[in-house]
Amino acid sequence: MIGYRVSQLLSITDFWQASGPILDVRSPGEYTQGHLPQAVSLPLFSDQERAQVGTCYKRQGKETAIELGLELVGPKMAGLVRQAKTLAPDRQVRVHCWRGGMRSGSVGWLLETSGLDVTLLAGGYKAFRQWVRATLAAPRPMIVVGGMTGTGKTDILYALKDLGEQVLDLEGLANHRGSSYGALMLPPQPSTEQFENLIAEQWIGFDSQRPVWVEAESRRVGTCCVPVEIVTQMEAAPTLEVMRSEAERLEILVDVYGQAQTDELVAATERLQKRLGGLRTQQAIEHIKSGELVAATAIILTYYDRTYRHDLVRRGKQIPQVDVSGMSALQAAKWLRCQVDEWGWNNNDNPLHVGDSLASNRRRFC
């Protein structure tokens, strides 16, 4: 395993653009904590084996640790080759470990000896994480879409994307809708580290001359922390507030969350008890159990609306309101584009006096 040779050793930018599946040979635990988007886990050691080798290295030295590693890997070599060939029918693979050291080098030697064309990532996953931090810090013009719970902001973002706009869907990447009910009917959330990786993958692909549309979020989306680099840019970006009638908001929310199990809705409502109040919480739960979701949602909105308005006051930021009542997500997206074009936000200018144009533009658009 010493003296291996591989065909290429590339920086993260070139590695990213190279051909073949990305094979992450770190342990399963390392992979779960965070990995390159699209990478496949092909661990050289299990979590327990990695810990065993690490302990051996500290207590008995490098040579003894290498010998232990050989003993552990020996029976796995044929299986590793078979898996790699199955994943790479064209015989081209990209391989990395944590630092770009012995693990990726050893697997690279094994796979190349078995007839595959191997590319290694210089600096390994550690170098990738440095790239993530630098990428997230790159400035991009942004337009932040705010609005009370139930105004359909996410659907409007999807419609904007369909219209060709650049959209960063933080909730989609976090697998969470950003409330006590946000995790219902969604896959488990990624780690914050993986959340950052996914954002960076999209961030690098955005045109720096065009705005990126993003929904207003707090610093956390469920358990995922929004990168400080993105938060800073969002706070400095022009922001608009989408408005809808309460009846529409209730309809949208019931349409989304009405598909959840009753016990899940009850549990999510109970988590709000300290802020919603004991009586209102109990009333909402009774409505949920009776299938009266509109009535339950109306009670719950009293908390979310109060919180939203309090946050606006705290920020002290002038935000133009755009009423999209009666509009589909696509119609609302088209009208928002009309507004920001007139306000000059597509040129990354700050809005000044935009209120006077809202009524006339709404009439023209509708």
Image: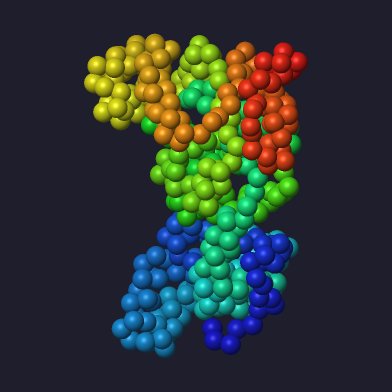
- Residue 22 x/y as whole percent: 62, 62
| Left or right, residue 110 beside residue 301 | right
Residue at (26% x, 22% y) in the render:
277
Residue at (43% x, 30% y) in the render:
313
Q: Residue furthest left?
A: 278
Q: Residue furthest front?
A: 353
Q: Is residue 273 visible?
A: yes
Q: To which quarter of the image does residue 337 belong?
A: top right
Q: To which quarter of the image does residue 37 belong?
A: bottom right
- Residue 41 x/y as whole percent: 53, 60
| Left or right, residue 120 beside residue 191 | right
The quarter of the picture where the N terminus appears is bottom right
The quarter of the picture where the C terminus appears is top right
Instruction: Identify whether 175 is placed above or below 58.
Output: above
Viewer-proximal residue, 257 or 271?
271
Viewer-proximal residue, 46 or 274?
274
| Left or right, residue 355 beside residue 130 | right
Viewer-proximal residue, 297 or 133?
133
Instruction: Identify whether 102 is placed above or below 86.
Output: below
Instruction: Identify whether 317 is placed above or below 12.
Output: above
Residue at (54% x, 86% y) in the render:
2
- Residue 327 x/y as whole percent: 64, 16
